[in-house]
């Protein structure tokens, strides 16, 4: 990111993740196995196409995602996490846990129930899975 508001680590993180869409894209790749533009576009939150293009570009520029031509369809691109992106897993898990704990409209689903039971084990298991996919 070219512009920084300050040298505070929280502010520096918000320069990248300070909107509601960026972490949802990361969630979709990390926890829902989505890889393509069309899969992200059809997420339940209904991201606009121009915002999706912008956020994917930012994530790629920040080296959180890599964009590659799909081996199955040469006219399609797929996105995957870099090691830097996979390192966001504990943050995403903490945000899920916090959201389920304090918002009655966000019930714990299967993963949320596992997180509540043994958060460290879930993070370790998902971390191993994500790291095995990094090129």
Image (cartoon, helix red, strand yellow):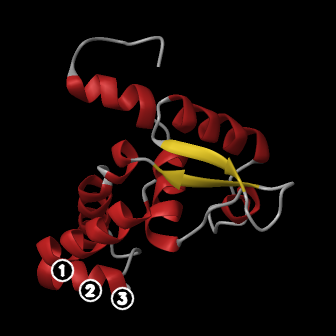
In the rendered view, tell whether residue 113 sits above or below residue 73: below
Residue found at x 73% / y 63%: 71
Residues at discs 2 and 3 in contact (Cβ within 8 Å): yes
The percent coordinates of residue 20 (x first, y second) are 50, 46
Mark pair 1, 2: CA separation: 5 Å
Name the secondary structure under disc 3: helix
The percent coordinates of residue 7 (x first, y second) are 24, 13
Residue found at x 61% / y 53%: 79
Asked whether the viewer can see residue 108, the reply is: no
| 63 lies left or right of 121 | right
Name the secondary structure under disc 2: helix
In the rendered view, tell whether residue 77 sits above or below residue 30: above
The image quadrant of residue 35 is: bottom right
Asked whether the viewer can see residue 93, the reply is: yes
In the rendered view, tell whether residue 88 sits above or below residue 103: above
Mark pair 2, 3: CA separation: 5 Å
Q: Which residue is mark 1?
A: 116
Q: Which residue is mark 2?
A: 113
Q: Which residue is mark 3?
A: 110
Residues at discs 1 and 2 in contact (Cβ within 8 Å): yes
Mark pair 1, 3: CA separation: 10 Å
Dot 3, crowdedness within 10 Å: few (<14), some or many (≥20)?
Answer: few
Question: Which one is in front, 97 or 134?
Answer: 134
Residue found at x 73% / y 59%: 70
Question: Which one is in front, 133 or 16?
Answer: 133
Task: Tell me which label, 1 or 3, sits earlier in the chain.
Answer: 3
């Amino acid at each position: 990111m070219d512009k920084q508001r300050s040298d505070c680590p929280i502010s520096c993180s918000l320069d990248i993740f300070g909107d509601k869409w960026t972490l949802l894209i990361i969630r979709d790749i990390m926890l829902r196995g989505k890889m393509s533009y069309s899969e992200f576009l059809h997420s339940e939150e209904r991201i606009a196409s121009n915002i999706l293009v912008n956020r994917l570009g930012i994530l790629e520029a920040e080296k959180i995602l890599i964009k590659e031509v799909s081996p199955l369809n040469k006219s399609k691109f797929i996105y995957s996490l870099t090691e830097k992106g996979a390192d966001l897993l504990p943050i995403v898990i903490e945000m899920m846990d916090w959201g389920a704990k304090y918002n009655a409209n966000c019930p714990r689903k299967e993963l949320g129930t596992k997180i509540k039971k043994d958060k460290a084990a879930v993070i370790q298991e998902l971390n191993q899975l994500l790291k095995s996919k990094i090129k």
